[in-house]
Image: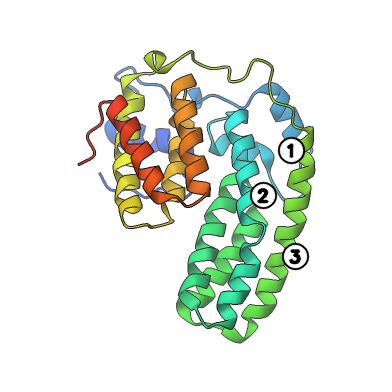
């Protein structure tokens, strides 16, 4: 098997590639079009989102789960509002590696929530730093990116205040026992990858955990991913590692 799936991983695209390479649709697996669509009320809310974040696209990135998407947006507002300021400080200190890492992370998170323009700006910063190209124009690009980020954070905060949680949320699934063996099989490689990154204190583990979010269905799994993400927000990698290993043990997933 040899294929490419760019970040962020889209459930429908992943399903389509798996279907092409493994033929699992013919064996009774779900088809790509069977991936849950966004809830109708949230989809209607997303249709009028012409302010820089494609909410409908972002919802699809997390499997149509509005509760998960709201959590991702809240994390974006909380953790990334000052990322451009940090990049500017690192640039002033000539710490180009830190600038590149921050831009790479912002690029992925922005793509995940559906903020295409912001993601493209972050990608341009990452590309310039990585290739040492037009570094003289980097401060101006950082300034434009910072203004776009500030604008989106303000608008996302306003939108979050109007996105009421669905009644009875979380809705789908009553517990881990309702999940299929395929879910565990999908979680296993992500957990192993996350463990390897946590052991080395690599912050890119955030992207791996984000891919686990759509798989955390059922009350117990959602609680585990919530606690894991809270620890990750505090960059408490030791606690994250302990939580991940405990979760893996509960799922009978071998990490070592």
In three-dimensional space, the C-alpha distance between marks 1 and 3, rounded to whole angstroms, equals: 20 Å
Answer with left or right where residue 70 lies relative to residue 49.
left
Query: Which marked residue is nearer to the observer: mark 3 or mark 2?
Result: 2
Q: Which tag, 3 or 2, sits closer to the chain's start?
A: 2
SS label for mark 3: helix
Q: Is residue 149 above or below residue 45?
A: below
Q: Is residue 125 at all visible to an observer of this figure?
A: yes
Alpha-carbon span between mark 3 and mark 2: 14 Å
Q: Position of residue 189 (x, y in %)?
A: 30, 39
Residue with the mark numbered 2: 77
The numbered dot on residue 147 is 3
Residue at point 80%, 43% (across, down): 158
Mark 1 element type? helix
Mark number displayed over residue 160: 1
Mark before the other along the chain sequence, 1 or 3: 3
Give the position of the N terminus as an image quadrant.
Answer: top left
Q: Residue at x 62, y 40 (%)?
A: 57
* Residue 51 point in image, percent of width and height: 78, 49
| C-beta proximity under 8 Å, tags 1 and 2 | yes
């Amino acid at each position: 098997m040899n294929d490419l799936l760019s970040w962020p991983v889209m459930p429908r695209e992943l399903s389509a590639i798996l279907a092409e390479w493994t033929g699992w649709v013919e064996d009774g697996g779900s088809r790509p079009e069977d991936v849950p669509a966004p809830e109708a009320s949230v989809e209607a809310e997303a249709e009028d989102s012409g302010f820089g974040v494609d909410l409908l696209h972002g919802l699809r990135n997390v499997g149509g789960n509005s509760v998960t998407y709201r959590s991702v947006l809240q994390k974006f507002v909380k953790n990334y509002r000052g990322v451009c300021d940090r990049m500017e400080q690192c640039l002033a200190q000539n710490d180009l590696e830190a600038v590149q890492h921050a831009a790479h992370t912002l690029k992925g998170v922005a793509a995940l929530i559906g903020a295409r323009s912001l993601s493209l700006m972050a990608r341009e910063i990452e590309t310039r730093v990585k290739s040492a190209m037009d570094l003289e124009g980097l401060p101006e690009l950082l300034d434009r990116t910072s203004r776009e980020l500030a604008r989106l954070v303000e608008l996302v905060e306003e939108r979050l205040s109007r996105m009421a949680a669905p009644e009875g949320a979380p809705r789908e699934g009553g517990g881990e026992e309702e999940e299929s063996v395929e879910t565990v099989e999908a979680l296993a490689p992500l957990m192993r990858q996350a463990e390897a990154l946590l052991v080395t204190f690599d912050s890119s583990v955030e992207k791996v955990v984000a891919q686990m979010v759509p798989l955390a269905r059922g009350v117990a799994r959602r609680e585990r991913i919530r606690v894991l993400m809270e620890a990750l927000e505090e960059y408490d990698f030791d606690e994250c590692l302990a939580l991940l290993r405990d979760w893996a043990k509960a799922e009978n997933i071998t990490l070592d």
